[in-house]
Each structure stands twice: as structure tokens, then as C-alpha cells.
Image: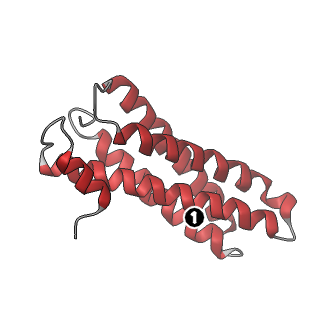
Amino acid sequence: METAVRGMLNIHPVGPIAPADADALSRCVERCMACAQASTACADACLAESEIRSLAAAVRTDLDCADLCTATAAVLTRLTVRNGDVVRSVLVACRTVCAACADECERHGDRHEHCRICAEACRDCEQACAELLELPEPVG
């Protein structure tokens, strides 16, 4: 089933993107958005926990991750007149913050299901960014 992200890539006037590149790009945008949602929800859930002080680093990292994932998805979605250096830098930053957020949430995942779920979403996004960075050009 074609996702909305993939559908937009297929009809974009910039022209066709190689199928493997379009797969990697759409997967990365989708995982960035999923990670942004999971990180935002995790931060909110952490704020509701009784031991909030011990989760302060998780909240901060969750929010940083959500912001960078949202920005990365937006940058990747814009195909017109791309700057490859900017795209690559944004992907590296997103991969880095996802790894940091996953590490932090994994520390709490045995006690808080929301942290475990967030860590999984972060690892998925981290991997999608890494796969896109492996392409010869950052797509577009």
C-alpha cells in the first residue's frame, strides 16, 4: 500500500526519484514523524510520573528529539532546489539525537512502557537516517 509520503514523492514535479531512493526517503520521513510523536508523548508521560525529577533528562532529550525529527521530516519533504550539505547535516543531527534519546529512554524502559516504546521509535528513526546517509547523494 502506498503511503501519503510516497504518493507525494511519486507525483512531485521535480521528477522521478529512483525507486530505492524514494523508498529510503519516504521511510525516513515517516519514521521521523513517528519518532517525533512518540518522543512528544513520552515527554508528556514522563511529566505525569511521580518520580519526575529522575526523568528530567528523558523529558529534555525527548523534546529535543521531537523537534529535530519534525524539522528533519520537513527538510526531507522539500525536494525543490535542495542543498545536499544541509540535508546531510540535518540527517546527521537527527540520527545523533535519536541515538541519545533512545539511550536515555532505554535506561527507564524497564519501569516505564512509554520510554520503551519511545526508544524503539528512536532506534527506527536513527536507522532510517543512517540508510539515507548511505546513499551517494542525500536524495533529491
Coloured how?
Answer: secondary structure
Q: Amino acid at mark 1?
A: Cys
Vertical placement of 71 versus 83: above or below?
below
Q: Which sits in the foreground, 74 or 31? A: 74
Residue 37 location (% of width, % of height): 55, 60
Picture residue at 78% right of the left edge, 59% below the top: 55
Tell me: 101 left or right of 77: right
Q: Which sits in the foreground, 40 or 51? A: 40
Residue 68 location (% of width, % of height): 54, 42
> Quarter holding the N terminus?
bottom left
Q: Which sits in the foreground, 12 or 34? A: 12
Tell me: 23 left or right of 128: left
Picture residue at 72% right of the left edge, 67% below the top: 45
Numbered label tally? 1
> Quarter holding the C terminus?
top left
In the structure shown, which secondary structural element does the residue marked by tag 1 occupy? helix
Q: Which sits in the foreground, 95 or 18? A: 18
Picture residue at 27% right of the left edge, 41% below the top: 134
Picture residue at 45% right of the left edge, 52% below the top: 32
Residue 49 location (% of width, % of height): 81, 70
Could you classify mark 1 by the number of other residues whose Cα lies within 10 Å: few (under 14), some (14-19), or many (20 or more)?
Answer: many
Tell me: 92 left or right of 80: right
Residue 43 location (% of width, % of height): 70, 59
Quarter occupied by residue 53: bottom right
The residue to which callout 1 is attached is 118
